[in-house]
Image (cartoon, rainbow, N blue to C red):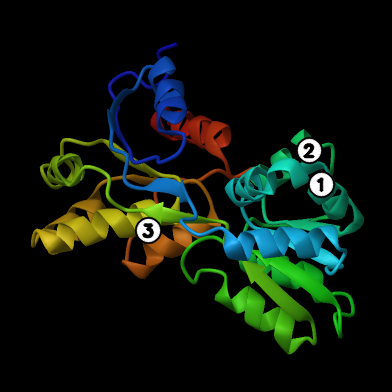
C-alpha cells in the first residue's frame, strides 16, 4: 500500500507504539518512532485492592471507566478475585468514556450501559447528569494527572457519593536522548506530520524541550508542522500550548480511524 508514500511521521505513541507505526508504514509512510511515556502498575496496590473488595461487596451502584488500561490493571490486581470482581462489575451500571474501556468490558463478557457521546470527561458528566444522582454511589476509574477533576467535582455537585481509583502510573523516563532527537527533527522541519495519540505524550515532549531550552523553538516548529490528534482530549491538550491540529478523526477516536484520517489528509 502506497497511500502515504513521501510522508515522514513522528509517532510518539506509548503503549501501542509498534502497532500504530506498523499501520502507518504499511500505508507507505516513513516513521520516526519515539516512545515518550511508559505505563506502569502501581508500586503500592493497597488502595486498588480495597477498591476491588468494595466492588465485590456491592458498594457502588455505578462505575465510570475512563480508560481501558485502567480496567485491565484492576482485573490484574484482582488475581484470584477476578471472577468475583467481574461479577461485581456486572451488577453496576457501567459508563465508558470511549471505545477502549468498552472493548475491555467485552473481553470480560460485559457491555457498557452508557457510552459518552464524545470520548471526554465532560461528555461523561453530561450523560450522567441527565438523570438523578443524589445519594448515588459512583466509582470513577481515573488516569494519572488531574484531567478528569471536573468530572469528579461535577458528580459531587449533583449529589453523588464519589469514590475514585487511579490504577496505574506514568513513568516519564523514556530515553531522553531519543526524545530530544525527535524534538530536534521537528525543529529542523524534517518531519512531515506529528501524530499524537495521548495527552501525556504532549506534556512529556514539551517538558524535555523546556529542560534543554528548546521549548520556544519546538512550539514555533509545531505551529507550522502539521499535527494529527486522535480525538478531543488530545486536541484540548494541544490547545493548552497554542497548537492547533491539522487533522483528527471525525468519530471513533482511536488508531485505525486516525490512520484513515491521515491518509485522507495526505491524498487531498
**Label 3 close to label 2 by CB (< 8 Å):** no
Q: Quadrant of residue 15?
A: top left
x 17%, y 57%: residue: 209
Is residue 113 visible in the rendered structure shown here? no
N-terminal of the two: label 3 or label 1?
1
Local crowd at mark 2 within 10 Å, few (<14), some, or many (≥20)? some
Is residue 108 visible in the rendered structure shown here? yes
Instruction: Name the residue carrying label 2.
Output: 108
x 45%, y 45%: residue: 197
N-terminal of the two: label 1 or label 2?
1
Local crowd at mark 1 within 10 Å, few (<14), some, or many (≥20)? some
N-terminal of the two: label 3 or label 2?
2
Q: Is residue 163 above or below residue 172?
A: below
**Label 1 close to label 2 by CB (< 8 Å):** yes
Of badges 3 and 2, nearer the viewer stands 2
Q: Residue 181 appears at what percent x and percent y?
A: 14, 40
Instruction: Name the residue carrying label 3.
Output: 244
Q: Is residue 148 above or below residue 72?
A: below
Instruction: Name the residue carrying label 1.
Output: 86
Q: Residue 112 appears at what percent x and percent y?
A: 82, 50
**Label 3 close to label 1 by CB (< 8 Å):** no
Amino acid at each position: 500500500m502506497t497511500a502515504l508514500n513521501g510522508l515522514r511521521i513522528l509517532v510518539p505513541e506509548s503503549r501501542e507504539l509498534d502497532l500504530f507505526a506498523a499501520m502507518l508504514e504499511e500505508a507507505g509512510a516513513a516513521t520516526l518512532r519515539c516512545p515518550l511515556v511508559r505505563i506502569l502498575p502501581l508500586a503500592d496496590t493497597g488502595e486498588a485492592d480495597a477498591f476491588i473488595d468494595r466492588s465485590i461487596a456491592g458498594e457502588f451502584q455505578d462505575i465510570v471507566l475512563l480508560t481501558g488500561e485502567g480496567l485491565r490493571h484492576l482485573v490484574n490486581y484482582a488475581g484470584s478475585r477476578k471472577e468475583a470482581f467481574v461479577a461485581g462489575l456486572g451488577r453496576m451500571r457501567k459508563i465508558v468514556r470511549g471505545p477502549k474501556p468498552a472493548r475491555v468490558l467485552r473481553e470480560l463478557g460485559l457491555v457498557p450501559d452508557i457510552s459518552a457521546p464524545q470520548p471526554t470527561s465532560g461528555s461523561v458528566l453530561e450523560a450522567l447528569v441527565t438523570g438523578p444522582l443524589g445519594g448515588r454511589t459512583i466509582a470513577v476509574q481515573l488516569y494519572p494527572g488531574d484531567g478528569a477533576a471536573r468530572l469528579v467535582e461535577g458528580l459531587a455537585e449533583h449529589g453523588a457519593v464519589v469514590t475514585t481509583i487511579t490504577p496505574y502510573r506514568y513513568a516519564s523516563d523514556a530515553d531522553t536522548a531519543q526524545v530530544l532527537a525527535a524534538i530536534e527533527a521537528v525543529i529542523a522541519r524534517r518531519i512531515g506530520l506529528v501524530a499524537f495519540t495521548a495527552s501525556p505524550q504532549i506534556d512529556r515532549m514539551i517538558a524535555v524541550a523546556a529542560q534543554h531550552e528548546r521549548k520556544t523553538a519546538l512550539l514555533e516548529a509545531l505551529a507550522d508542522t502539521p499535527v494529527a490528534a486522535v480525538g478531543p482530549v488530545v486536541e484540548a491538550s494541544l490547545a493548552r500550548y497554542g497548537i492547533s491540529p491539522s487533522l483528527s478523526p471525525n468519530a471513533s477516536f482511536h488508531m485505525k480511524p486516525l490512520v484513515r484520517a491521515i491518509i485522507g489528509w495526505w491524498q487531498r
